Amino acid sequence: MSDRRKFIRDVSLAGTGMMLSGLPGFAIQSGRPSNKLVIGIMGTNSRGMALAKTFSRLPDVEIGYICDPDETVLNRTIDALDKLTGKRPKGFADVRQMVLQKDMDALAIAAPDHWHAPGAIIALQAGKHVYVEKPCSHNPREGELLVAAQVKYNKFVQMGNQRRSYPNVNDMLRKLHSGAIGRVYFARGWYTNNRKPIGFGKKIAPPSHLNFDLWQGPAPRRSFQDNLVHYNWHWFWHWGTGEALNNGTHMIDLMRWGLHADYPTQVVSSGGRFHYKDDWETPDTQVINVNFPNNTACTWEGRSCNIFESEGSGTGVVFYGENGTVVYGGGNSYKLFDYAGKLVSEVKDGSVFDPSNRVSPFDKLDENHLQNFCQTIRGQDQLASPILEGHKSTLIPQLGNIAFRTGRALNCDPTNGRILKDPEAMKLWKRSYEKGWEVMV
Ligand SMILES: NC(=O)c1ccc[n+]([C@@H]2O[C@H](COP(=O)([O-])OP(=O)(O)OC[C@H]3O[C@@H](n4cnc5c(N)ncnc54)[C@H](O)[C@@H]3O)[C@@H](O)[C@H]2O)c1
């Protein structure tokens, strides 16, 4: 077994409860003569379209089904895939109908965040594997439910924190873990952009091509307003999770991985909606500071409205160790410095991070993560990002947002991240649901 394989296998086994050697071949399991996988995609306005295109480039993968409550988006995606692959996927408005398709092996979810865990659980209950975009949940309780559902229904669930499948990121983590800069005790991550204001929305009837009831799904009903769909829901707590989950999850995942850290002991956060006055509710500027029980800490800085780079990159992480420093610029490259600050080695990749491309800034590299998911279903790999790891990395920025919203330092149980002795903050651990849409495992 190669080092990378062994490494991935070691990281993954805890989260899946499944042994590579114990899985029968996919073709035998599925009763199919080939390794063909049929994928359904939920939500295809931008990220879902990118996922559909990338999945369809993989060998023996077919996009059989597309689901979106926006008819315009649905038809556009079906036409685009037809043109690209010569096969027309079948369209649905309602994911609950789509997951009933017998030949569908897996659901890939790129709907808004309030749909991630509920959609994944619906798919698991229908016996499907799941690729769920980051963040894997809207709130911590939903993350816990998703982890429980993965165990109960025993299917593969991978989160879309795709850097876990970038080759040089794996190489960097291997070096960090083997002591290349001594014990790593601190990490600093960041994300920058120059997002424009979203104005003050007018309450109007939803457009006729959008089924807003299905768009809201599990979220308690609110009136439609004209600055919400698509994309700007990210900045409303009711459906979105802010930049901390939107982009922070990626770097926080790497920091946690590099620090060998699971759940935190303490989380604090400061920031605000500073740059513009509009309907945007989540912070556009935020710092989240986290302490872990293994004598390590990390900090994440998000600037949604000031794109000034740090360490020459719009997103990235610096790992600080007892004997040196590693600088990672968000892509598939990194630099290693000794304790005196002298460059020791540099591992380069040609891919350039484009923070203004919010859909797929490293398209070709992302393919690795989707291939890893497909190969795992076929019994030929182990998940690079099993859902328990995805949940831990999603939980940290969620706790950051709870600390920000309550204005308090949160003390957490290091075995599960739950907030200690603060019932007010624990109210934000979960959400309420529209009647009939409660999420249950
Ligand atoms: N991994 C990454 O690098 C990456 C990059 C971009 C986006 N994302 C994630 O992808 C998700 C989607 O982001 P986006 O920018 O494409 O958002 P978007 O608002 O542009 O698109 C979301 C789509 O989901 C559809 N949708 C809503 N409810 C649905 C339902 N019940 N069933 C099916 N479809 C539904 C919407 O109609 C829309 O077409 C987000 O959670 C985001 O965090 C991940």
Image: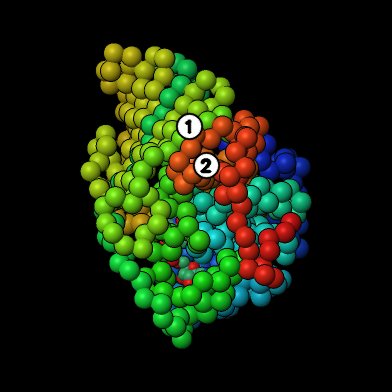
Element on which disc 2 rests = helix
What residue would you read off at disc 2? 399
Name above or below for residue 12 compared with residue 339: below
Q: Which quarter of the picture shows residue 329?
A: top left
- In depth, the one of 119 and 235 nearer the eye is 235
- Residue name at image x 36 percent, y 63 percent: 279
Q: CA distance from mark 1 to mark 2?
A: 9 Å
User: 227 and 353: which one is in front?
Assistant: 227
Dot 1 amino acid type: Val
Residue located at (45% from left, 41% from top): 407
Are the two marked residues, 1 and 2, in contact with CB atoms closer than 8 angstroms?
yes
The residue pinned by badge 1 equals 290
In the displayed structure, does residue 331 sit left or right of residue 29? left
108 shown above or below 366? below
Question: x, y (%) of residue 258?
Answer: 48, 29
Task: Please provide percent x and percent y for residue 436.
Answer: 69, 70
